């Protein structure tokens, strides 16, 4: 537990330092535009440069950058995970179509692809949570991961109470089903209905093309909130939305077009 606490403390500090510097840079631009003399502008510039140098030195000490010139890189993991979720959801749907055509041997393929689709869908939502949770003050954990993440995202993006409840319901479904797959327990059970219209094992009745599609649709709706939040909580959230816009344009929205075309 102490390791998780230390990790969260370090991540929160990193995010805070980044946005505090960005705040200072934006405030500098405003103050510079209002400055009435060359001397005042120079004083503002000196103050900003001193802050940048101080932050750079501290980041080297914290192991967040090289001592000399260097490049900083990262991956936006929710963008990668939604790609994986979509890829395996599509495969699950293809297997379902084969089942509907009479090839029941594809049941195992559909099950496998749906298991991965659920895991990736939940991972995309978790990664979005990790990318945004440090933009706001810490919140008390809820009884489950789905409820905790829904509460945090609702606060970050400014959801009304009715929207918050819908999000909590949807994420509870995704994470409960993901946990059922990842922490599987093998038990003999009576057959249950498969979406194709026949009885099959309980696992195939829960992990299949339609269920994977439902999970992906939930993730895409969550990412739509991230792209255009109803009421961003603060300045940092607004900046985060702006900085992540390209990932919606290049990754998420093309997936949404394909997914909605299939549904329609």
Image (cartoon, rainbow, N blue to C red):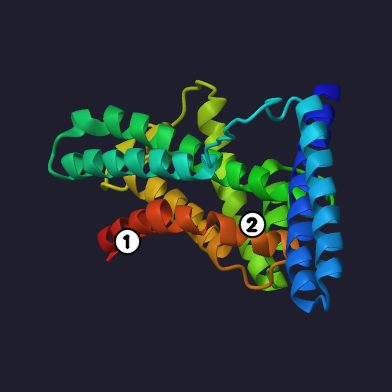
Quadrant in which the N terminus is drawn: top right
Q: How far across and how far down the image is residue 144, in percent?
A: 72, 42
Q: What residue is shown at x 46% (from left), y 49% (from top)? A: 215
| Disc assigned to residue 240 | 2
| Disc assigned to residue 136 | none
Q: Is residue 135 left or right of residue 2?
A: left
Q: Nearer the viewer, residue 161 or 134?
A: 134
Q: What residue is shown at x 34% (from left), y 33% (from top)? A: 113
Q: Name the residue that disc number 1 marks.
A: 257
Q: How far across and how far down the image is residue 50, in percent?
A: 84, 47
Q: What residue is shown at x 40% (from left), y 38% (from top)? A: 84
N-terminal of the two: label 2 or label 1? 2
Marks 2 and 1, how far apart at CA: 24 Å
Mark 2 Cα shell of 10 Å, populated few (<14), some (14-19), many (≥20):
some
Q: Nearer the viewer, residue 193 or 107?
A: 107
Element under disc 2: helix
Q: How far across and how far down the image is residue 115, in percent?
A: 42, 33
Q: Is residue 74 visible?
A: yes
Q: Quadrant of residue 72?
A: top right
| Circles 2 and 1: CB atoms closer than 8 Å | no
Q: Quadrant of residue 85?
A: top left
Q: How far across and how far down the image is residue 221, in percent?
A: 50, 61
Quadrant in which the C terminus is drawn: bottom left
Element under disc 1: helix
Q: Is residue 227 left or right of residue 100?
A: right
Mark 1 Cα shell of 10 Å, populated few (<14), some (14-19), many (≥20):
few
In front: label 2 or label 1: 2
> Would you place residue 152 above or below residue 238 in this image?
above
Q: Nearer the viewer, residue 27 or 149?
A: 27
């Amino acid at each position: 537990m102490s390791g998780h606490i230390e990790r969260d403390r370090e991540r929160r500090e990193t995010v805070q330092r980044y946005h505090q510097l960005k705040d200072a840079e934006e405030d500098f631009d405003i103050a510079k535009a209002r400055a009435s003399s060359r001397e005042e502008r120079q004083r503002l510039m000196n103050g900003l440069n001193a802050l940048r140098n101080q932050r750079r030195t501290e980041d080297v000490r914290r192991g967040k950058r090289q001592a000399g010139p260097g490049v900083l890189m990262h991956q936006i993991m929710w963008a990668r995970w939604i790609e994986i979720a979509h890829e395996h959801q599509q495969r699950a749907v293809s297997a379902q179509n084969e089942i509907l055509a009479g090839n029941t041997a594809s049941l195992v393929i559909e099950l496998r692809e749906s298991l991965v689709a659920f895991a990736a869908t939940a991972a995309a939502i978790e990664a979005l949570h990790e990318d945004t949770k440090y933009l706001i003050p810490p919140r008390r954990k809820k009884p489950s991961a789905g409820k905790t993440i829904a509460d945090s995202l609702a606060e970050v993006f400014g959801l009304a109470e009715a929207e918050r409840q819908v999000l909590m319901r949807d994420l509870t479904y995704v994470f409960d089903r993901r946990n059922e797959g990842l922490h599987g327990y093998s038990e003999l059970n009576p057959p249950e209905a498969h979406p194709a219209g026949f009885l099959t094992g309980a696992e195939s009745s829960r992990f299949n093309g339609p269920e994977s599609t439902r999970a992906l649709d939930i993730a895409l709706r969550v990412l739509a909130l991230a792209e255009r939040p109803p009421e961003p909580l603060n300045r940092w959230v607004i900046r985060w939305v702006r900085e992540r816009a390209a990932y919606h344009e290049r990754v998420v929205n093309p997936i949404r077009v394909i997914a909605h075309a299939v549904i329609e």
